Image (spheres, rainbow, N blue to C red):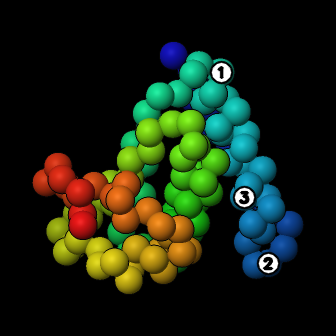
Amino acid sequence: MVEMRDIIRIAGANNGITDDELREIVDEVLGEAGKQPLKKILLLPPDFTRMHSGAGKITAMIYSKLKDSVQVDIMPALGTHDPMTREQVEVFFEGWCLMRRCLSTTGGRTW
């Protein structure tokens, strides 16, 4: 088992962390996780109501880096919200075609 640790970055600009800085962080996390071969991963981002969190962008980055070698499933944490529409998924995950990987909280594919 890989030991978990905190990764903290302070944004150098008033606009927050840049996409390049975010990619570096994702690469660092995946590098740590990849010390043991990954077969499957379940990503649990929030739903569209938390669009401002950047979790969709982070999820899309992780998906794009692992999709060719790891089974990546995504289950948006809906809480009491309705499942995301196809359009919301496209916007939230920045155009990555992830619909076939999205699971509903009832155990099936969203679409």
* Label 3 Cα neighbours within 10 Å, binned few <14 / some 14-19 / many ≥20: some
Image quarter for residue 68? top right
The residue at 54%/75% (across/down) is 95
Residue sitting nearer the eye, 6 or 41:
41
Image coordinates of residue 83 in percent, x first then y, are 23, 71
**Circle 2: element type:** loop
C-alpha gap between disc 3 and disc 2:
15 Å
Foreground mark, 1 or 2, reads: 1
Foreground mark, 3 or 2, reads: 3
Q: Earlier in the sequence, mark 1 or mark 2?
A: 2
C-alpha gap between disc 1 and disc 2:
34 Å
Residue type, label 1: Lys
Residue type, label 3: Leu
Read off the residue under disc 2: 14
Q: Is residue 30 left or right of residue 12?
A: left
C-alpha gap between disc 1 and disc 3:
20 Å
Residue type, label 2: Asn
* Label 2 Cα neighbours within 10 Å, binned few <14 / some 14-19 / many ≥20: few
Name the disc covering residue 22, or none. Answer: 3
* Label 1 Cα neighbours within 10 Å, binned few <14 / some 14-19 / many ≥20: few
Residue sitting nearer the eye, 35 or 49:
35
Q: Earlier in the sequence, mark 1 or mark 3?
A: 3
Read off the residue under disc 1: 35
Image coordinates of residue 12 in percent, x first then y, are 86, 66
**Circle 3: element type:** helix
Q: Is residue 12 left or right of residue 94?
A: right
Residue 99's place in the image compared with 3, above or below, is below
Q: Is residue 20 visible?
A: yes
The residue at 79%/78% (across/down) is 14
Mark 1 in CB contact with mark 3 (< 8 angstroms) = no
Q: Is residue 15 left or right of residue 34?
A: right
